[in-house]
Structures are given as C-alpha cells and as structure tokens.
Amino acid sequence: MPENVQDALNSVPFRVTDREKIPAERYYDPEFFELEKKHLWPRVWQMACRLEEIPHVGDYVEYTILDKSVIVVRTHDGVKAFYNACRHRGVRLANGPGNCAKQGFICPFHGWRWDPQGECTFVFGKEIFNQELLDQSEIDLAPVRVEFWAGCAFINFDDNAPPLLECLGPVVKRLNARHVDKLRMDWWYGTILPTNWKLAMEAFMEGYHVMQTHRQLFDLSPGSAYGPDADGVLPAPGASAREVVNKNIDFMARLSTGMAGMVHETEVAVLEKLRDMDVPDDPMEAMMAFFAQAQADITKDGFERGAPMFDIPKVNQEHPFADVEFMFPHFFLLPSFAAMSSYRIRPLTPETCLFEIWSLVLRPEDEEYDTPSEPTILRYDSNEFPEIPKQDYSNLPIQQLGLHNFEYMRLAKDQEGMISNYQRLVDGYLAQLDDETLRKAQNTVNCGYNSPIHDIGF
Ligand code: FES
Ligand SMILES: [Fe+2]
C-alpha cells in the first residue's frame, strides 16, 4: 500500500485496523458521523427513487440525505435531478412527491418560477437586481448528477465520481439477467430505527443469525452450515426424499409469509403443486430434482401470466447470485425465484436511521395496480411488519445500546465478511482516497451475503 494511502487511512478515527474487529464507536461517535456526512455521502451513488414512483411527465419526488435535498423529476426529456433550493434565497421548493407538469416549481417566498426541466421562467421585478446575478445559468435550478439502473434513479453530488455502473461492478450483470429493471412494487414500508444506519444494514449481511433470530426458518431449513451447536434443531438425519421435498416447500412458504414477498405468493402456489412430484429415492437428488422443477414451473407460470419473465434455470446457472445482494453504500436487492425484496437505509442522526423495505414482483404489464407514491411508515415494532423484518428489527435497538458498553465487534471471517469489507470501504472514503481505488474496492464489496473477508485493495 502506498505510504500516502496508509497515512490517510491512519488519520481516520476508530478505523478498522484488524479486519475481523469493528470498533464500537463507529456506530455512535458524533465525530465519526460528521466525517461520513462530509466525506462519504457527498461522493457516492445513492438510490434516490424507483422510477415507477414518477411514471408521468411532471411527476417528481424529493430525496433527502442528511441536510441535503434533491428533486428527481420526470420531464419530456428524461428524468432529471436538481438541488431542492430556490436560486434567489434558498427556499426548499419541493416537499415530498408531486406533479409539476402544469405549474412547474414556484417559490412560495418571492414567486420565482421554473419549468419541469429546471429552467427559470419568471423572476418578479427583474430590474431591481444587478443583471449579472440573473444570468440564466445562475438562476436555473442547479443540476445534480443522475444515472439509472434496476428501475431506479441514482444521484451523486460528486461531478468527478466514476459512472454508476462502473462503481457497482459485476453485481449489475447478475441482477440484469434477472430482469431487475422490470420489477415493480408490490408494497413499500418504512420505519425509523433507533440505531446507527450501518448497524441496521449489518442485520441483513449474514445468515449466521437465522438460527436464533428466525428460529421458524431454521427449523425448516434442510441443514445448517454452522455445526454441532445446532444439532438439536437440525432435521432428523435419514429424512426420506419426500420429506425433504415437503420441508423445502414448507420453508419457502414460511419465507414467503415471513417477508410478505421475496418468494411471492404466486410462486408458492406453483411450489405447492410439487408436493406429489416424482422424485429419486436419494434425498439429495430429490432436493435437486425439486429445485429444477420448481424453477422451470415458476418460469412457465410467469410467462403464462404475461409477466416480463426470464428463464430462471438458465439464468441461475449462468449468473450465480447471492440471496442478499448489496450495492454500497445503502441499497439491497434480495433475489429468490423471480420476485425480490429490497431495502434502502439512510442515516438520520448518529443513532437513528430510516429503513425502507419493498416487495418487488415481475407483474404483467396489463395488470391493474395502484403504485404507492410514498412508504407506509410504521413503528419498528409494529405488528404490521412481516415476521422476518420484525424479528430483525427487534434486535437492533438493544444492540445499539450494548455497543456503548464494549470495544469491538468480532466477526466470523467466512460468514460475516461483508460487514468487514464495506466498513473498510467506508474508511477509504473517510480517508479521501482517490476515485479509482474506491471504485475498485466497491466492485469487490458488492459481492453479497455470507461472503468471506476480502482484500479490497487497501
Ligand atoms: S427565496 Fe425563492 S423567490 Fe425568493
Ligand atoms: Fe434476518
């Protein structure tokens, strides 16, 4: 590692020096939070909205991150993004979602106006200003970079950051194969968690917690990778081929109700029909035969319903994916068959964050559906949350409290590596490393669930 890089990293407070240990202060220290605000969030691509939130010309949303606010608007000339501030004296122009096709944006203070493309169309009493202050480029809404992927608009405040897809890396290809751009919302929830944003994300970065946190899933899973401690709850050895198939269907059905999606109910209906399928006597072969049939039948069902389907068996073979795919710094997609769940996490204060969840489906184009324009905001302990996120959320507030009483997290190097990998990338941003180094590291960090600790280049 070049000396200047090492020096820059050394200047980051509470940085990760041992890859398997994450210092606790990173989750509550106000100075650390300020450094993230100053050096991380202004330089990264952030999922600002799903494009289906703004289907018509003039539709816009407000995306907020810490003290910054951006308007993302669909114009006749494509989707654009602007800083959400009047060019006269700074008043915020948009508050939440809306449509500006008829009126454009009007500042409520002195009445300046902009068309949906951000061009200033009216300044009241122009002659009272020094004309140099009213150069058209000075009074048009200030643009923010915006690029598109996976049916979403991503913004970046850094004009020099590499393009979005180059930052995301290989994850793009494996999710494109799953028609990620054609996914549509089934529902959208949000909640404010009393935890640091990174802590909230990390609850979804490993499967090690399933045994204790999601016992209902663990009891139905065909086996555990985590050894002898779990013996008591493993399925009885010597389960018959039929039992293995049924258990897998039970597992998928429980996962589906537990997430209210991910494995969509239409997919579970297809799986239920396989309970009587002919399977080889060997349990392992039976399981493989079951999954092959399940993937083929769900594909067929999707095409028959007119969904913008892909060939699941072929794509799974050609583009192996992780059950939880992470796109640094704060966006997740969770593929299973064709449906997915999705998360976005945003910091609010050092010890609070906004956590959003979507259930996404490949819906037939002609199916009538009311797309939500805003998330339904629930308390994090609300019974309206599906079982699985509710269980995950229940740990987080007490983990945040516990962090104030210990030194560092100790990570399982082969299962909890994702946490170490992205945390060290955060340090790269706080050390203000160069764009190319950070881009390469991000390509490695976006590698998905249960991954081992990787070398990210610094
Ligand atoms: S502050 Fe917006 S018009 Fe004056
Ligand atoms: Fe979980």
Image: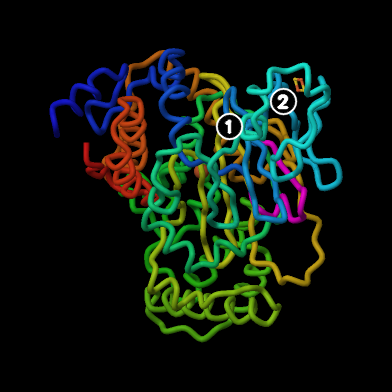
Dot 1 beta carbon under 8 Å from ligand 2: no
> The residue tagged with tag 2: helix, strand or loop?
loop
Where residue 127 is drawn, which disc sits there?
none
User: Would residue 84 appear left or right of 247 to someone viewing this image?
Assistant: right
Q: Which quadrant holds the N terminus?
A: top left
Q: Which residues are magenta?
A: 50-62
Q: Residue furthest bottom?
A: 278
Look at the image and tell me whether residue 178 can be seen. yes
Can you give x and y, in whole percent of width and height, for residue 109 in the image? 81, 20
As for residue 225 lying within the magenta part, the answer is: no
> What residue type is disc 2 on?
Arg
Q: Is residue 362 above or below residue 206?
A: below
Can you give x and y, in whole percent of width and height, for residue 188 in the image? 69, 46
Rendered image coloring scheme: rainbow
Look at the image and tell me whether residue 380 can be seen. no
Q: Residue at x 47, y 70 (%)?
A: 244
| Crowd around label 1: few <14 · some 14–19 · many ≥20 (10 Å) | some
Instruction: Confirm or deny contact between disc 2 and disc 1 (CB under 8 A).
Output: no
> The residue tagged with tag 1: helix, strand or loop?
helix
Q: Residue at x 51, y 80 (%)?
A: 293
Can you give x and y, in whole percent of width and height, for residue 454 in the image? 25, 45
Q: Residue at x 38, y 17 (%)?
A: 25
User: Would residue 104 appear left or right of 73 to someone viewing this image?
Assistant: right
| Residue carrying label 1 | 394
Between disc 2 and disc 1, the foreground one is: 2
| Residue carrying label 2 | 92
Q: Nearer the viewer, residue 5 or 336?
A: 5
Q: Is residue 131 above or below residue 365?
A: above
Q: Nearer the viewer, residue 227 or 203?
A: 203
Dot 2 beta carbon under 8 Å from ligand 1: no
Q: Nearer the viewer, residue 24 or 278?
A: 24
> What residue type is disc 1 on?
Ser
